[in-house]
Image (cartoon, helix red, strand yellow):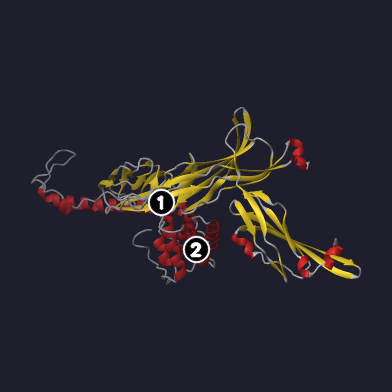
């Protein structure tokens, strides 16, 4: 055979053929091109108009016959048709030669009904056949097989004018159908129509190889190729109704509830409120923000929301939980309106509003927990009520001469002053000695730097805030005071990001990255002048 090939002209030495003239939609066919042209590769780009290209290989062989040498190359590429029908593989240029066009028959995959007689069948289910534009539609694909499936590829093509994305991981289980046990692979997708009108959703399809039981994995004769598909479905996409609430939010249901709601609060102190929202039929990217309306007499500080996505009843469901701190400005009765979200009921085709009842709080006056106990007031002689013309001694009840009243008052006043001074001295000495015993030794600068470094490595916002407060030696948890003590602009901006992230007004990850970059070399504090040590005791004890 090689002698005949050598005797032919160069154009006859290049030929192309398919390994199968007929395949099922979804399967792959191999295109082989043999040539003796001195080419390193072949341009397969003309094939991309009709086929998806797979792996490419090349095999080269060297022959020497009757003193003449020849080199033969065989190029192979996998072709996957994009649609069934009679297709033409176009001619390709190979060096100075051109291959002939080839004919390929692509059959549609067989639609196997969900019966116990079918060894393998595929199902496609949608949770809404008449969805609205931009509504999240859950699509569930199930592969059922009662015979060993050695290999296979399960696909669902995206329809035109809609987005389709896979959601979550595959679920595997078994079920009985007509007394026959089937293994099931369930795969979920999210379909979002982009415009109204009819929408053709192709059925999911499987292309695989089944085996004949135990011997099927060892003997090629027991293996069979299988190509099955679910029926196509046509959805009727509805347009956005006139007068629908904006932003447009089509759902099956939306529920709001309080997980924690206080009854009483104190002025200047935070009262914690926790709320939950469950949106049936929406992803995390579609749900609105869960917020309280602004009230002039209260400050609202919200933490970042906790979001959980699920796939329930064949469609997405998103649960949002958020904790909010309410800080009343003054004492008295306070009413805070609850969150309110307007949405569109896609099942009953009507606009709805989900609202939480307002919070009614009785705000008490704030109390400073760090204020020292007040001493009892000392009576002032000038404020004493006027006495009668004759005073009575408490001892004997005898009248006291008016001339002695002035001396008794002077002596009593002096004794009272001495007693008060004694009480103050006793309280001062006791307080001072107690402070000396209970006050811990201040942490060293190295320990504070180490604590800040570990907090930055952990990425915990609360821990970083505590480390900065300790390093700045601020008495309370006041990041504004920390920022005022810093002498570096980048570090001040990083602390601002920290404050915003802790109250839900900024991105936590961005704040951590900014803090790590700004405090990589440690905190840089403002220089302060040292006061001269005084020989006199302080006027007010610390």
Q: Is residue 25 left or right of residue 19?
A: left
Is residue 480 shown above or below 177? Answer: below
Secondary structure under badge 1?
A: loop
Q: If the image is split into quadrants, where does the C terminus sit?
A: bottom left
Q: CA distance from mark 2 to mark 1?
A: 48 Å
Q: Position of residue 493 (x, y in %)?
A: 44, 66
| Mark 2 / mark 1, whichever is N-terminal | 1
Q: Nearer the viewer, residue 478 or 187?
A: 187
Q: Is residue 47 left or right of residue 407?
A: right
Q: Residue at x 61, y 27 (%)?
A: 179
Q: Residue at x 11, y 42 (%)?
A: 399
Q: Nearer the viewer, residue 134 or 292?
A: 134
Label 1, on which residue?
196
Label 2, on which residue?
515
Q: Position of residue 295 (x, y in %)?
A: 28, 52
Secondary structure under badge 2?
A: helix
């Amino acid at each position: 055979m090689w002698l005949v090939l050598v005797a032919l002209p160069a154009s006859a030495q290049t030929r192309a053929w398919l390994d199968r003239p007929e395949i099922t939609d979804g399967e792959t066919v191999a295109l082989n091109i043999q040539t003796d042209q001195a080419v390193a590769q072949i341009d397969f780009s003309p094939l991309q108009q009709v086929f998806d290209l797979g792996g490419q290989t090349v095999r080269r062989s060297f022959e020497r016959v009757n003193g003449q040498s020849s080199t033969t190359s065989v190029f192979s590429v996998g072709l996957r048709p994009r649609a069934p029908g009679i297709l033409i593989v176009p001619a390709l240029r190979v060096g100075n030669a051109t291959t002939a066009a080839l004919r390929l028959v692509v059959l549609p995959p067989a639609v196997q009904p969900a019966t116990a007689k079918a060894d393998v069948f595929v199902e496609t289910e949608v949770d809404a056949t008449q969805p609205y534009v931009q509504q999240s539609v859950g699509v569930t694909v199930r592969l059922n097989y009662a015979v060993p499936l050695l290999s296979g590829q399960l696909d669902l093509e995206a329809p035109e004018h809609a987005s389709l994305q896979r959601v979550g991981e595959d679920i595997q289980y078994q079920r009985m159908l007509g007394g026959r046990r089937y293994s099931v692979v369930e795969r979920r997708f999210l379909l979002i129509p982009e415009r109204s009108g009819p929408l053709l959703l192709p059925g999911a399809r499987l292309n695989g190889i089944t085996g004949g039981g135990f011997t099927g994995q060892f003997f090629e004769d027991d293996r069979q190729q299988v190509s099955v598909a679910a029926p196509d479905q046509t959805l009727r996409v509805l347009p956005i109704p006139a007068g629908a609430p904006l932003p447009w939010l089509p759902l099956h249901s939306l529920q709001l509830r309080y997980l924690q709601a206080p009854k009483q609060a104190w002025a200047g102190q935070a009262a914690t409120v926790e709320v939950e929202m469950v949106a049936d039929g929406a992803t995390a990217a579609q749900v609105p923000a869960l917020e309280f309306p602004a009230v002039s007499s209260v400050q609202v500080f919200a933490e970042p929301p906790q979001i959980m996505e699920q796939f329930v009843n064949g469609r997405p469901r998103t649960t949002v939980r958020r904790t909010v701190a309410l800080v009343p400005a003054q004492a008295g009765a306070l009413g805070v309106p609850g969150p309110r979200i307007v949405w569109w009921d896609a099942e009953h085709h009507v606009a709805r509003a989900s609202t939480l009842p307002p919070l009614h709080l009785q705000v008490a006056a704030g109390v400073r927990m760090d204020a020292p106990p007040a001493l009892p007031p000392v009576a002032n002689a000038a404020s004493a009520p006027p006495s009668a013309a004759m005073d009575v001694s408490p001892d004997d009840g005898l009248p006291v001469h008016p001339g002695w009243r002035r001396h008794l008052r002077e002596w009593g006043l002096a004794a009272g002053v001495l007693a008060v001074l004694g009480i103050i001295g006793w309280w001062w000495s006791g307080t001072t000695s107690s402070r000396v015993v209970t006050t811990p030794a201040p942490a060293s600068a190295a320990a504070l730097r180490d604590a800040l470094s570990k907090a930055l490595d952990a990425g915990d916002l609360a821990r970083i805030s505590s480390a900065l407060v300790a390093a700045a030696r601020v008495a309370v948890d006041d990041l504004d005071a920390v920022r005022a003590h810093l002498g570096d602009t980048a570090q001040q901006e990083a602390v601002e990001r920290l404050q915003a992230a802790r109250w839900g007004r900024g991105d936590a990850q961005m704040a951590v990255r900014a803090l790590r970059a700004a405090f990589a070399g440690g905190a840089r504090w403002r220089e302060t002048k040292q006061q001269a040590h005084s020989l006199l005791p302080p006027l007010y004890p610390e």
